[in-house]
């Protein structure tokens, strides 16, 4: 290896600073051909240190001695790095979740709500990470934080995350063999939730019915449906017409 010397340039105040220069290595050739000089990198400004240049030159000499062109090895390394980067993007949590939305949740009545929870809770935290890198500790961090303010929501999120990772394993293409939700139970992680016992009396029911009539369509109709069927809010609001009208074929 031959490293070009560091030239020093005087500054206005009389001090001296190193100038960026390149480090190179002379690569031998077979068959009596002239050796080839190849650049290792830019020396100075923390681009590459002298010790790193020497180490690289030593590795190149070792490869040349075995009849291997370092340029080929570097090209293979760059290609592998590109493939790994593309794989990480393809298998990122956000991209895998989108496939889950399209092929799983899109066919479920509550799929839109589950997708909304995914986009607001999980994707902002895990979006760029490979789905196989999500750990049990990552799941616990989200569920534990949510249970402080919304225990029921925390249970629903744990169930949703478990469904997602089970689906990912079933696809057998994302290099995930064990769900990070395995062994996590709602009772152990969130605890018991107190069921609500509040009920509307007759006067309150009448007032709600009359107020719903003043709201107009479609909001008023939704509240009438809830009163008549005892459905939950989103169950009533997201019903499709066939669920109400039945099969007319």
Image (tube, rainbow, N blue to C red):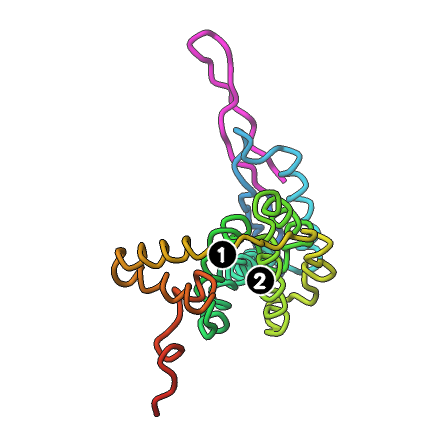
Alpha carbon distance from label 2 to label 1: 9 Å
The quarter of the picture where the N terminus appears is top right
Q: In this view, does 211 lie to the left or right of 45?
A: left
Q: Which residue in the protein does label 2 denote?
A: 160
Which comes before the other along the chain, label 2 or label 1? 1
Residue 249 or residue 47, whichever sits in front? 249
Q: Which residue in the protein does label 1 denote?
A: 117
Dot 2 crowding, Cα within 10 Å, few <14, some 14–19, many 20+:
some
Figure check: 77 above or below 242: above
* Quarter of the rendering containing residue 166: bottom right
Residue at the front extreme? 203
Residue 104 or residue 53, whichever sits in front? 104
Q: What element carries label 2?
A: helix
User: Residue 36: x, y in percent?
Assistant: 55, 50
* Quarter of the rendering containing residue 77: bottom right
The residue sitting at 47% across, 51% down in the picture is: 120
User: Residue 116: x, y in percent?
Assistant: 45, 58
The quarter of the picture where the C terminus appears is bottom left
Residue at the bottom extreme? 249
Residue 113 or residue 7, whichever sits in front? 113
Determine whether label 2 and label 1 are within 8 Å by CB: yes
* Quarter of the rendering containing residue 206: bottom left
Residue 38 or residue 179, whichever sits in front? 179
User: Residue 227: x, y in percent?
Assistant: 41, 64
Q: What element carries label 1?
A: helix
The residue sitting at 48% across, 68% down in the picture is: 99
Whether 88 is among the magenta residues is no
User: Residue 27: x, y in percent?
Assistant: 60, 49
The reply to whether residue 32 is in sight is no
The residue sitting at 38% across, 67% down in the picture is: 225
Which residues lie in the magenta part?
Answer: 1-24
Identify the mark at residue 165; answer none if there is no mark.
none
């Amino acid at each position: 290896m031959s490293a070009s010397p560091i030239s020093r340039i005087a500054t206005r105040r009389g001090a001296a600073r190193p100038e960026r220069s390149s480090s190179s290595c002379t690569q031998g050739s077979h068959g009596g051909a002239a050796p080839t000089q190849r650049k290792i990198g830019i020396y100075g400004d923390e681009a590459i240190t002298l010790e790193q240049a020497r180490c690289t030159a030593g590795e190149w000499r070792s490869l040349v001695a075995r009849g291997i062109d370092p340029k080929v090895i570097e090209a293979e390394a760059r290609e592998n790095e590109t493939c790994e980067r593309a794989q990480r993007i393809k298998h990122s949590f956000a991209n895998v979740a989108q496939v889950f939305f399209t092929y799983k949740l899109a066919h479920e009545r509550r799929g839109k709500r589950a997708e909304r929870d995914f986009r607001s809770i999980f994707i902002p935290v895990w979006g760029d990470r490979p789905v196989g890198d999500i750990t049990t500790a990552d799941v616990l961090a989200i569920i534990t934080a949510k249970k402080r303010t919304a225990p029921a929501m925390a249970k629903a999120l744990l169930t949703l995350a478990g469904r997602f990772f089970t689906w990912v394993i079933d696809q057998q293409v994302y290099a995930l063999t064990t769900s990070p939700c395995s062994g996590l139970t709602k009772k152990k992680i969130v605890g018991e939730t107190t069921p609500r016992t509040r009920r509307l009396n007759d006067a309150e029911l009448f007032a709600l019915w009359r107020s719903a009539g003043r709201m107009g369509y479609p909001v008023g109709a939704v509240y009438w449906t809830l009163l008549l069927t005892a459905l939950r809010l989103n169950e009533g609001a997201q019903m499709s017409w066939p669920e109400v009208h039945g099969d007319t074929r």
